[in-house]
Image (cartoon, coloured by chain):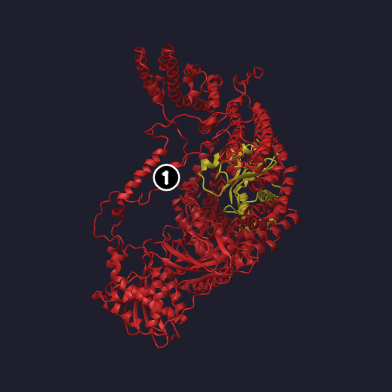
Chain colours: A red, B yellow
Amino acid sequence: MALKMVKGSIDRMFDKNLQDLVRGIRNHKEDEAKYISQCIDEIKQELKQDNIAVKANAVCKLTYLQMLGYDISWAAFNIIEVMSASKFTFKRIGYLAASQSFHEGTDVIMLTTNQIRKDLSSPSQYDTGVALTGLSCFVTPDLARDLANDIMTLMSHTKPYIRKKAVLIMYKVFLKYPESLRPAFPRLKEKLEDPDPGVQSAAVNVICELARRNPKNYLSLAPLFFKLMTSSTNNWVLIKIIKLFGALTPLEPRLGKKLIEPLTNLIHSTSAMSLLYECVNTVIAVLISLSSGMPNHSASIQLCVQKLRILIEDSDQNLKYLGLLAMSKILKTHPKSVQSHKDLILQCLDDKDESIRLRALDLLYGMVSKKNLMEIVKKLMTHVDKAEGTTYRDELLTKIIDICSQSNYQYITNFEWYISILVELTRLEGTRHGHLIAAQMLDVAIRVKAIRKFAVSQMSALLDSAHLLASSTQRNGICEVLYAAAWICGEFSEHLQEPHHTLEAMLRPRVTTLPGHIQAVYVQNVVKLYASILQQKEQAGEAEGAQAVTQLMVDRLPQFVQSADLEVQERASCILQLVKHIQKLQAKDVPVAEEVSALFAGELNPVAPKAQKKVPVPEGLDLDAWINEPLSDSESEDERPRAVFHEEEQRRPKHRPSEADEEELARRREARKQEQANNPFYIKSSPSPQKRYQDTPGVEHIPVVQIDLSVPLKVPGLPMSDQYVKLEEERRHRQKLEKDKRRKKRKEKEKKGKRRHSSLPTESDEDIAPAQQVDIVTEEMPENALPSDEDDKDPNDPYRALDIDLDKPLADSEKLPIQKHRNTETSKSPEKDVPMVEKKSKKPKKKEKKHKEKERDKEKRKEKEKKAEDLDFWLSTTPPPAPAPAPVPSTDECEDAKTEAQGEEDDAEGQDQDKKSPKPKKKKHRKEKEERTKGKKKSKKQPPGSEEAAGEPVQNGAPEEEQLPPESSYSLLAENSYVKMTCDIRGSLQEDSQVTVAIVLENRSSSILKGMELSVLDSLNARMARPQGSSVHDGVPVPFQLPPGVSNEAQYVFTIQSIVMAQKLKGTLSFIAKNDEGATHEKLDFRLHFSCSSYLITTPCYSDAFAKLLESGDLSMSSVKVDGIRMSFQNLLAKICFHHHFSVVERVDSCASMYSRSIQGHHVCLLVKKGENSVSVDGKCSDSTLLSNLLEEMKATLAKC
Amino acid sequence: MIQAILVFNNHGKPRLVRFYQRFPEEIQQQIVRETFHLVLKRDDNICNFLEGGSLIGGSDYKLIYRHYATLYFVFCVDSSESELGILDLIQVFVETLDKCFENVCELDLIFHMDKVHYILQEVVMGGMVLETNMNEIVAQIEAQNRLEKSEDQVLG
């Protein structure tokens, strides 16, 4: 042993250490690769030795090589060996190598679980620290799940050094194992108030990262953060918190109001630029969220803009950059306050720093208006000429196009000017954005009908000019514009002045040097051009001219037939044959023009890029359904294993198709027609009156084409956009004069030039009417297109999984898995103790601790819930809404319940008829009278199987008939002096995740209430079904108005994902109360409580089916007992039936079995026993959480009895 | 979140490469090269922020760097980090290096890459800022060095 040690250290002396390796590499500059491969061989030898020191040294060298780009994944196992060394020195080397090279794909990573767990619980804080650091870099979902609990324990470690690391790493754990978020969150929150500033900062850091992705779940922490913000002096923490508030304010405007003051104070007081900057940023965010109706915040905006101006004018380039960045945020909501600094921003365009120029460009984008567009673009064009470096020039180019085309060309008053700008841009050398210019040309020419004539003349000039062709081979970017030019000239050939000339230009031999796809367009459009020339000539009776054109085609087309590009070749040979055929006909003096132009009849309409996606799926068409049922191996296999009841299996016969068949088909046919009509690629049966234009005014503004030979770069025949600037100014001036005159003349006619439907002119803009009477054709969308934008969401967003409601109480199933320790085995052979990943049953030793933890958690939770409710109070300046009192149970209610229960029982055999009616059963209690009689009648025809069950309620219902006014299941939601809201929540069996919330609004005031809107803050689990197209933050209108004293009911559907837990949603009813004195805006906050019982649907059940269900054994069990109950057993049962939607299956003496079913098909069975003064309820349910929550609710009900 | 921390010299030789998101080695090298070319052509008197572009992550990411004598320190961060804050953090990191190596120079980084990593680990962990107080950082590093030394003595 001792000898081995000695031998080992001798070996070590001869080994290269890291420094030797580095030195060696530096001395072998010529053959570095060779030298390194030699070193790697040595390292491989070293790794084979037993001595851990040698191994560690080798791994250390590997880490260096990894930095140089060498893959060291082959040594992963050796790295693990070094990680498991007992000495910190080696362990650290191992973990460093692992953190640099391990990733989710490293297969041996699962061998590390136990080693890491051992290190985490090591008595040395640095062992733990190094393990945490390493793990933070290579944590995988498996590791996260297995170690989450260990790390959570470390969050309460005695050493702040460990605590802060444990807190930070939790973020990584959450990302990989989102289930851990809810159990760990209370402790994380606790760390916000840790005595150690480092730990506090880490907790802030983690929560900020979490909240940044899913801010709404962290709103309830706002008061805590607010406190931290006003108390903390650590700038780093302050910055994080202020950034977080920036993310929260959009969700809660009231928060913003509260923030403005302390933030403004900070802005004035702080000397740290970083903090000042973040404060300004958040104030901006607040102002954005408050944007409307806040006149007194103009001071804040001014303060921000003023501070930013100071930043921008600073000599420090960093501050300048950030100032511009923040300015662009203000611009979005308060463009006016930024526009006054236009001088400063244009000045930044001249800055030597590209980043700053780019930021300034961004700002310009938002600053344009109809008035200054031409001026700004002119400025940009001069920059394009000056710019060195293609990237910046390309950026300028895209910006020019962006600026001009933004919001549907809103700011362009003169499209001739725009076209000439585009044409000027084609002179840019070496740009990558030819296709962008081309797309703009096409778009403008297609959508602005009035400009086509001008566009065609410009495009033909482009086709004619040689400069684009000449450059096509070297600089492939810009020749893309020829694609557009060729197409425009072809498609709108009737506007060409010299079609023959253009035709020849397009048939030049040089064209064949263009890329294939452009040639293909050339070929196709040559024919269009040819067709229109042919028509002209024939109409003019120039048969010879027509034949000459044909001859030209026949002569020149073969050059395309020889093309190597398949598309070009195919089109060319096809067309060549066609033309040859025409030639033959022409020789016989047959008029052909009509037929040739018929080839291109019809007009192409622009279609929105997302149109296809937005075609709504017709009702009744299920795209996921099988067209042909797949062959199943065994028919007997039960597709719905939970369905135990006979009726249930029959309950879902395929009803729908047959009833809808006829209309369905007709409707689809209609829809198809409709769609075809809208689809430009369908040639309509009746050719549309093609290419007819309303008129083309503004012709007088087309300038005489100038040929400026003094500037060599300028393409002859292309007008300079500058002329338009002048012309436009003159025109505007003239227009203004005219308008003034007109205004005097006919003031009563309020027909101001609102000819452009797409623009939203500001008041100053409105004065400027566009030069051409422009009709911007909007892009077509399918009928009833879905306006949703969900296609923008990335389904693979890793942060989506962390969108978790943190205010919900923790369920047992959510506890972090705790694994058994098995760390006593030798760490030499880690394969042996590969941890099993499945959730092991909890170790008894830990149970106690765990229990305590649970208790603690519970307390925390309570506290937190309280706090969440406090948020409203904290935020609101008005007193918080009165809590909705729980419905006071009274005997009359029981009576109702009984009758209802009876009704339900009776309905059992009525199921067959009722099966499909989606009418919620609960409605029945309102028509209880009729229900009652009906029930009695029906009860006579009970099937023998359910005699007992049916007999019971009748018996029950008999005695206490001394009823008070009928009580309803509607519970009070909220009320104020204007309105009282009561609501009832009903599940429906048809939709397994939907409940209908019926809200009755009663007007108690003397005003008329209108414009009522309901906005509900969705949670992860419960969402309000909103009309298509409205966002989560939009309110949903109430479909009626309420005159004084009137009440009405509105129903809203909510989609619930998991029904096993009760759920609270906050909401606000906003309305306008109008009376003789005037109208006021009012608000009423409420809190919708979805109890678990509201997800149950009273479902009758026969005793034999019930027995079968109990026998099946896949139900979990739980029970409660309530003491001090004096109510009679019948009444108790009735109460349970009514409030919790159960039905009695069987009753024997003081013992009854009851059944209900949730909207998602959970079975709930109860055995209710009455003792002397107590009631015990044993429940069985297919979901244990649901059951325990239900029993809790039931306990609360019974406790009131 | 910090996505990557790169240190390289005026010739683009990497001295420290720390990614907090997995990239294969060859991509890492490519990113180092591209980043080097991006910052190299920038004058010292222009701003220290660069839009990351195609490098890592996309538009949400920024390169924030500082140039000290022969070395560039580049942090690639997303929008949750304060730009000026990160600049300060780079300063803290460099000052810590200076304290630990006693007048740090490029050679220290060349020959002690592992130590530089250990120092960085006390400043940034898993892409998140762990500690910004220099005294605390130095204290922890020295404690670990002492631990290492004591182990060395046991080894003999």
Instruction: Read off the chain for label 1.
Output: A
Name the residue nearer the viewer: A149 or A1116.
A1116
Quarter that holds the C terminus of chain A = bottom left
Marks counted in the figure total: 1
Residue A1036 x/y as whole percent: 51, 58
Q: Can residue A589 be seen in this view?
A: yes
- The quarter of the displayed image where residue A1193 is located: bottom left
Secondary structure beneath disc 1? loop
Above-or-below relation of A900 to A175: below
Give the residue number, with chain letter if any, for mark 1: A615
Q: In this view, does A980 lie above or below A553?
A: below
| Res A1179 → quadrant | bottom left
Depth check: give the residue in front, A493 or A424: A493
Relative placement, left or right, of A876 versus A175 is right
Say if A1166 sits above or below A752 in the image.
below
Where's residue A366, x and y in %? 63, 42
Farthest-out residue, bottom: A1172
> In front: A621, or A1159?
A621
Can I make out residue A435 in this image? no
Amino acid type, callout 1: Val
Name the spot of residue A529 as percent of width and height, x first: 45, 21
The picture quadrant where one finds residue A203 is: bottom right
Decide if residue B133 is on the left or right side of residue A500: right
> Which residue sits at x=73%, y=51%?
A303
Where is residue A758? Give x, y as percent. 56, 40
Mark 1 surroundings: few (<14), some (14-19) or many (≥20) residues within 10 A: some
